[in-house]
Image (spheres, coloured by chain):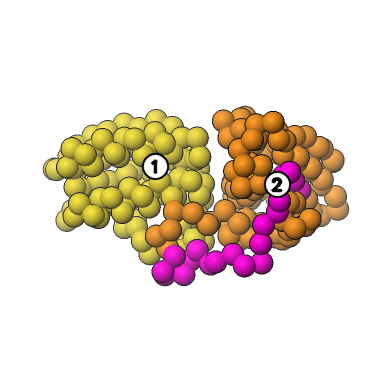
Amino acid sequence: MKFSTQIPSRLDLLPEFISSLLEKVKVLPIKEEDLFNLKLSIEEALINAIKHGNKMDPHLMVEVNLEAKDDQLIIQIKDQGEGFDFKNLPDPTQNDRLEKTSGRGVFLMRHLMDEVEFLDCGRIVKMVKFLKKGDKQ
Amino acid sequence: MKIVQEKANGVVIFILEGEININTSPELRKAADTLIKSNEKKVLMDFSAVTYIDSSGLATLIEILQRLKRNGGILRLSNLSEKVKNVFEVTKLYKLFEIFESKEEALKNF
């Protein structure tokens, strides 16, 4: 399975857009719990791309590529921003940062997906979820 | 998201339903704002019908908690599904919030 799409940088469009992406992956062997984590990771990546990458400019698009091959689902989300320093993100679970109201998006993606990698200076996030035959919703 | 408000023994209970996400969390913030302004101090949010929460939803709950605490108030959460509870565990936010298995449990000794 291979699928590419894009979305204008508008947060109000996210629920329907994410639902349509999840419909595409429902045919794959993914447990319901992983589907929840996938949804959360995709949403956090899209919010980052729209808010921090494209600075909420509705004329700028966010590209999404889904590819299921062998035993993995690969999702790449690309914005048109300037990138960011993904190597020096503070740990939001440190006691002195627990009450912060931001900075959990990338952390959640890294913990809920099997692999997360930033490419092109942070403009692209590549997330991988391993698929196991027999895993059903 | 749907918010139904109840009051029992001086505790304001928000029965939340649906997703707490970047688009719906402003509704929750607004509802909490109204009760904090009316000087309510004991708040329970029941999550039994909450199907999803994202980092914006978590941030909104942290804001509400901080505002209540500043007023000498208390915020408790109850009935989190396993998937929602996992988000609190991964982010270690269970350290910040008082989380209870049931509404009845949360209402004890409030």
Q: How many marks?
A: 2
Chain that appears orange: A
Q: Which chain is yellow?
A: B
Q: Residue furthest left?
A: B9
Magenta segment includes A102: no
**Three-letter amino acid code of the residue under disc 1:** Ser
The residues tagged by marks 1 and 2 sit, at their Cα atoms, a distance apart of 39 Å
Percent position of residue A102, x then y = 49, 54
Asked if badges 1 and 2 are on one and the same chain, I answer no
Residue A32 seen in the figure: no
Front residue of A83 and A14 = A83
Label 1 Cα crowd, 10 Å radius (few <14 / some 14-19 / many 20+): some
Residue A124: x, y in percent? 75, 51
Residue A78 higher or lower than A5, as above or below: below
The disc placed on residue B48 is 1
- The quadrant of the image that shows the C terminus of chain A is top right
Q: Is residue B65 above or below residue A13?
A: below
Q: Residue at x 46, y 70 (%)?
A: A94
Q: Secondary structure at mark 2?
A: loop
Left or right: B42 in relation to B51: left
Q: Which residue is drawn at the image coordinates 33% and 43% (left, top)?
A: B46
**Image position, residue A52 (x, y; %):** 61, 47
Relative depth, front residue between B30 and B18: B30
Nearest to the eye among marks 1 and 2: give it: 2
> Which residue, given by chain and number where applicable, does mark 2 sit on?
A81
Q: Are marks 1 and 2 in contact (CB under 8 Å)?
A: no
Where disc 1 sits, the SS reads strand
User: Does residue B62 show up?
Assistant: yes
Q: Which residues are magenta?
A: A75-97
Residue at 53 percent of width and 56 percent of height: A104
For residue B62, side relative to residue A61 (left or right): left
Specify whether A91 is left or right of B13. right
